[in-house]
């Protein structure tokens, strides 16, 4: 039976990164199953064809505010609350689907008023993310109240969807969420879109893109390229990546580093110049999601230096589906995705990160073989269609009044 789903996305959707990709791909996969989805979100962001997106008005004092932890989000969330309640009244959803903790909190309010079930798409700890962004001091007076609020929010939904297995352990052990509420809905990748590319295709794309985007720099035909894709922020490990690149280049490597993403590229470009590596570290800026697959084709090795221990890291799955070997800082989310096929460095250890990259660059045959293994793992374990069917099974359990634990839904998802 098709359902009407109101998704609450307290972010500037669509923004070509992280949680935005999860919201997009879940929505597309649910629509393929016949469900109707409306997304309520902040005023900024890019509209996406075939998606029903309803936006709030901007906050008058910060019209161009887009991403990141900030006091300005409080103003946006006030407007988002009004928009969610209006959308719930007009759209008349069967179910409320909140993304991130703010989305779950607003979903709880709408669920109480309109008497609809709520599910929560958990993508990391609220206080953990605020600490990572240096917006919250774990020793400050606001930390404990916010952590208490986070725990309260975690207990309100009927089900919580986690993108990584480790997150379920976090919710059980630290926030005392009952196991029967936790349903593992892994991130996925499109294996037809993200795929391995031939050497000929790779060379063609390198030439076309760099002639267009980075006219003053060229990549030598046989030089290896290390790729990073994501937000440009210190908690994402971009500074550590630059430090590792400097060490690798100082030791005589012929590699280039393609650092794709936003915002704040100017700061990292300046740092690269100061470090003397600007000619080998390229910043093409924000890459639209439909173009990501080809940009990843430029690379021989992918890197995921994220420092957060709780947030999802969906870029890794796109690396894997593209057949790229991956060097990552060792954390539970990276382990969940990469398994035994990852090349790991202790979190924050720049020299170990550099060594992992150098190891793959030194033996290209072994790197290609590792990339093939990771692609196979992506094909077998991470599919948006399979994840959408698990979500649908949770909706069924709530709306058809079936008493099922999350564990039962994991084992026996409804088949369309």
Image (cartoon, rainbow, N blue to C red):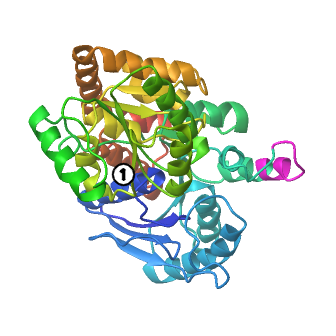
| Helix, strand or loop for disc 1 | helix
Nearest the viewer among 22 and 180 is 22
Nearest the viewer among 85 and 347 is 347
Give neighbour class at mark 1: few <14, some 14-19, many 20+ (Cα, 10 Å).
many
In this rendering, the answer to whether 115 lies above or below 286 is: below
In this rendering, the answer to whether 176 lies above or below 89 is: above
Nearest the viewer among 288 and 145 is 288
The magenta stretch spans residue 142: yes
Residue 295 horizontal/vertical position (percent)? 27, 47
Which image quarter: residue 309?
Answer: top right
Could you tell me which residue is drawn at 29 percent across and 40 percent down? 383
Q: Residue furthest right?
A: 141
Question: Horizontal placement of 305 versus 73: left or right?
Answer: left
Residue 42 horizontal/vertical position (percent)? 53, 72
Q: Residue furthest left?
A: 200
In this rendering, the answer to whether 68 lies above or below 249 is: below
Residue 274 visible (yes or no):
yes
Q: Quadrant of the N terminus?
A: bottom left
Question: Horizontal placement of 368 versus 335: left or right?
Answer: left
Could you tell me which residue is drawn at 31 percent across and 63 percent down? 35
In magenta, the rendered stretch is 138-147
Residue 40 horizontal/vertical position (percent)? 48, 72
The magenta stretch spans residue 7: no
Residue 232 visible (yes or no):
no
**Residue pointed to by mark 1:** 392
Could you tell me which residue is drawn at 57 percent across and 39 percent down? 239
Residue 290 horizontal/vertical position (percent)? 26, 57
Nearest the viewer among 3 and 277 is 277
The total of numbered circles placed on residues is: 1
């Amino acid at each position: 039976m098709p359902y009407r789903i109101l998704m609450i996305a307290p972010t500037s959707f669509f923004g070509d990164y992280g949680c935005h990709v999860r919201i997009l791909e879940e929505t597309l996969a649910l629509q393929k199953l016949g469900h109707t989805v409306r997304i309520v979100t902040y005023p900024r962001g890019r509209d996406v064809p075939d998606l029903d997106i309803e936006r709030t008005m901007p906050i008058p004092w910060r019209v161009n505010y887009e991403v990141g932890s900030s006091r300005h989000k409080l103003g946006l969330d006030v407007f988002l609350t009004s928009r969610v309640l209006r959308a719930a009244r007009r759209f008349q959803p069967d179910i409320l689907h909140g993304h991130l903790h703010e989305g779950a909190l607003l979903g709880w309010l709408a669920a109480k008023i309109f008497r609809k079930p709520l599910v929560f798409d958990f993508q990391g700890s609220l206080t953990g993310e605020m600490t990572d962004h240096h917006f919250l001091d774990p020793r400050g007076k606001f930390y404990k109240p916010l952590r208490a609020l986070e725990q309260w929010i975690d207990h309100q939904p009927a089900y919580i969807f986690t993108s990584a297995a480790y997150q379920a352990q976090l919710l059980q052990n630290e926030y005392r969420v009952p196991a029967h509420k936790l349903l593992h809905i892994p991130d996925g990748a499109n294996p037809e879109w993200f795929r391995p590319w031939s050497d000929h295709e790779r060379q063609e794309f390198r030439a076309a893109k760099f002639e267009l985007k980075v006219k003053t720099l060229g990549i030598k035909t046989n030089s290896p390229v290390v790729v990073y894709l994501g937000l440009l922020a210190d908690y994402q490990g971009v500074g550590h990546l630059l430090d590792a690149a400097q060490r690798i280049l100082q030791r005589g490597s012929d590699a280039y580093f393609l650092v794709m993403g936003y915002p704040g590229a100017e700061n990292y470009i300046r740092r690269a110049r100061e470090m003397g590596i600007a000619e080998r570290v390229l910043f093409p800026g924000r890459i639209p999601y439909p173009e990501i697959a080809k940009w990843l084709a430029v690379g021989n090795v992918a890197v995921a230096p994220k420092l957060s221990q709780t947030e999802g890291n969906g870029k890794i799955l796109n690396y894997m589906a593209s057949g790229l070997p991956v060097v990552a800082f060792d954390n539970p989310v990276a382990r969940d995705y990469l398994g035994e096929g990852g090349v790991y460095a202790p979190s924050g250890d720049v020299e170990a990160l550099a060594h992992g990259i150098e190891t793959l660059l030194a033996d290209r045959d072994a790197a290609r073989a590792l990339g093939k293994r990771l692609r196979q793992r992506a094909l077998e374990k991470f599919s948006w269609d399979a994840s959408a069917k698990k979500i649908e099974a949770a909706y069924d359990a709530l709306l058809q009044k079936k008493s099922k634990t999350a564990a039962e839904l994991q084992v026996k998802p409804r088949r369309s």
